[in-house]
Amino acid sequence: MSLENIQRFVLVLLYGGLILFSFTVLINPMRVNKKANLFFGLFLFLWSSYWILNVLQFCDIPSDPLFELGVYAVQIFTPIFLFFSVIFFINPNYRFQKRDAVCIIIPFIYWILLVNSGDNKTIHATVMLIAVSHNLPYIALIYFKIRKHQKRIETISSNTENIDLQWLIKLSFLLFITIIITVGYELFNTFIYKMHQHLVMDLLFLFIVYSTLYYVLRQKEIYPVDKKQREELLSIELESDAEQIEKKKLISDQEFEILKQKLVSLMEAEKPYLDGDLNLLKLSDLIQINAHQLSYLLNTGFNENFFHFVNKYRVQYAKELLLDDSQKKLSMVGIAFESGFNSKTAFNTIFKKMTEMTPSEFKKNHSDL
């Protein structure tokens, strides 16, 4: 098989995969993260447009200049749809505001230049520069917003592995790398040697597309489906954005110490931390106060967020299992699940963060004593 035919095959996998992937996400068979998946599906559909002209070319299907202009015109919205997909993953109750109209400014300038580029090489080069550089600020914004989300989500959830959107950070990083490579590739083509094969680039994009497919289809609902619970958790999470500059006293001084002791007694006696899906709402119901009060109690009384408070008990329970001779039959995965962790990866990561050693190292060090 010739190199050209291999490239055609990769193009079919790439373009066809993106189209199929986009419709799968738009249909959203799991009915989760509805608004986020709507925008992510549209992002994928626009992303596929970057290869449609190549597919038409090797299929010997002539493309009308007006059609090509339309393709280039909509491509400018690709990073915008990805950005708003992230916004709705982080806050499914987000409402569009007037300030969001700023996203239209660059596309508007781009359209004017695109229509008037013609045979003018300077304008054409400017259009291409805008098309590439327009992605970079959105990639940066996505990175910082997800990092902020990862910190905030710890105020309401004890297990963040499947809701921290780490896969979107990886996607943004890979897109950034491919943009840099693409720019370098085009500069090489323009000033050094004109290459007609794009196989390496297409293989790189193929890897990104199918890796993304794996993660987005596994993305669970970040917040409860129940509207009232979702709004309550979101309000607590967003309050943490202000870094509690003005801490309102939500619990009287008389009740404060009583509730602290009640919470500690509950954690030690009933062990709610063994529930892998324990969140702020569940624990607040057990202690019979609202979620805002529990968050205030943890932050003020224990100087900890919900994530650290719960996982501190899980790590201590895991230590006991690791040192218990009657539990030797349990594997590390078994100990992880018995202690309330939802995966071995989360178990190892949190255990090491809190003890400065892995569970295996902890067990070995104490077995040598």
Image (cartoon, rainbow, N blue to C red):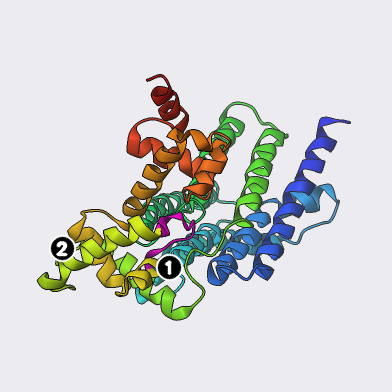
Q: Residue furthest right?
A: 1
Residue sitting at 65 percent across and 52 percent down? 213
Residue that label 1 marks: 91
Would you say 287 lies left or right of 341 here?
left
Q: Nearer the viewer, residue 345 or 285?
A: 285
Q: Is disc 1 placed on a helix, strand or loop?
A: loop
The quadrant of the image that shows the N terminus is top right
Instruction: Name the residue furthest top.
Output: 368
Q: Are marks 1 and 2 in contact (CB under 8 Å)?
A: no
Residue named by callout 2: 245
Which mark sits nearer the N-terminus, 1 or 2? 1
Q: Quadrant of residue 280?
A: bottom left
Residues at marks 1 and 2, CA–CA distance in whole angstroms: 22 Å
The part of the chain drawn in magenta is 271-280
Secondary structure at badge 2 equals: loop
The x and y percentages for residue 276 are 49, 56
Q: Residue at x 84, y 56 (%)?
A: 61
Q: Does any portion of residue 152 appear in the rendered image?
A: no
Q: Quadrant of residue 266?
A: bottom left
> Measured from the top left, where is residue 244 in percent x and y?
19, 63
